[in-house]
Amino acid sequence: MFLIIIFYIIFAKPSSQQPDIQVSPGSQNGTNASPFPSQTKIKPFDTAAQAKQEDGERAFAKSQDDIIKNYPWFNKLPLQTKDYFVYFDVEKKSFVGLLYPSNFSKNLEMTSTVNMKAQIRKSLTALGIDFSGYKFTWKIKPQYKSDVVLNKTSIEKRAGLQKKGKF
Amino acid sequence: MKKELLITLEILTIIFIFPVTVFAQSAVSNCWVTAVGFPGGLPKLPAGCGSNAPASPGNGTSGPCGSVVDWAAKIVPSLVIGGGGYLSGDGYDNRTQDFSSPCGHSSSRDTWQGQYWCTYLVIDAYNLAGISGLKMGVDDGVENMHIHFGSLPGFFTLPYNGSANQDTIQKIKPGFAIFFNNDYHVGLIKSISFDAHGNGTMDTYESNSHATSHTFTIAEWQIIASGYTINGFGGH
């Protein structure tokens, strides 16, 4: 028996080469491949590099300072609920409102988005944000497909029951 | 006879030799160990498995001496404006307190090149947490630090080009480094939250800036940048 086993081990076709134990890091967050070419060299942090970095740091700091200086209410945003998300786009100088009405019916959707916009303006005012003079960009977003399917299914069922005179 | 022998061999193979593959998560790490055959014991786990690291998923990047964010949270209140060296000016570029952990010490003042640079907060927080690799005298420049996040063992980079990217946003964790303006500034991710639509916010800890923390809006899986660019993240 033992000889047969040995015979097989020696003459059996080898399977795909793989180590006895494979270990994969649990972290799948990023890539271990450097975005930089392998010959990228570490540069000395000399006076010139320091001056360049200092300029860059100051530019970043100034960009943040300017936002607060020009829009003192900026850090009070974004407004976020399950139905909407509102932020200020500094580059476009515009409020952006992402609306997620949950009603399937087109008419109800229109009503709910009108209500949402009113609620948003009220919330901005309560936060002391003067939005007059700024444009609003509204984007009405469909709900998840599952929500839409669920709503549609419910409505179809209701329609079916109505047809049968049971609702 | 030969045919019978081959059949016998096949049966014996199935019974005795057929490789047994066991998939199991190691009880002492967050790595999956695939055992083929009957190996004895666990293999030596790579650094990325964190076999000796205390689990701290809520605080993101962690080492044997705590989370990077926790150490940054300790360092940041000690930052003041000015007085921190010959380059120290109107930013939070001076650290007024030293810190130590069983894993290491915060950078010594005489190693600072002119001031407490933005990179020093990252170096100190990582080393105090026990994640070694980033060094004073080597990673002082943001560009060098970004290179090392992409090349040091256990470290990795997460590229970001400013556009909406659900996969990238979902991978960002507290403790990650965030690189700005083509590697002219770096900070640490303090927290990040977003809903199923990809809307939320991301906060940072920073040194050598006009504030020690900033909040960035995330809308539909895109970080809304204003007057700056984000060119990537780094983690461990």
Image (spheres, coloured by chain):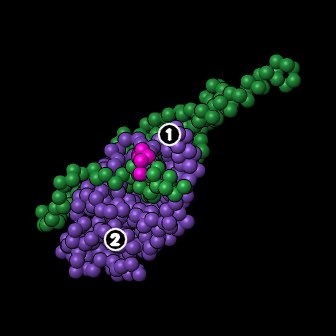
Q: Position of residue B166 (x, y in %)?
A: 45, 43
What residue is at 25 percent from the left and 66 percent from the top? B139
> Is A11 one of the magenta-colored residues?
yes
Sequence order check: which comes first, mark 1 or mark 2? 1
Chain identity of mark 2: B
Quadrant of the rendering where the C terminus of chain A is positioned? top right
Q: Name the side, left or right, on which B45 lies relative to B113.
A: right
Q: Is residue A113 above or below residue B199?
A: above
- Where is residue A102? Give x, y as percent: 63, 35
Is residue B139 at all visible to an observer of this figure? yes
In the image, the segment drawn in magenta is A10-16
Magenta: main secondary structure: loop
- Crowding at mark 2 (Cα within 10 Å: few <14, some 14-19, many 20+): some
**Residue A99 on the magenta segment:** no
In percent of the image, x 42 and y 47: which residue is there?
A: A11
Q: Residue at x 36, y 51 (%)?
A: A31
Residue under numbered circle 1: B2
**Which residue is at 52% across, 52% downward?**
B17
Identity, as a three-letter code, of the amino acid under mark 2: Ser
Residue B195's mark? none
Identify the residue position indicated by label 2 in the image. B132
Badge 2 marks a residue whose secondary structure is loop
Q: Secondary structure at mark 1?
A: helix
Tell me how far mark 1 sits from mark 2, CA to CA: 62 Å
Residue A71 shows in the view: no
| Chain ID of residue with mark 1 | B
Q: Amino acid at mark 1?
A: Lys
What colour denotes chain B?
purple
Determine the residue located farthest toward the top in the rendered image: A163
In the image, is residue B174 above or below residue B159?
Answer: below
**Which quarter shows the N terminus of chain A?**
bottom right
- Rendered green, the chain in question is A
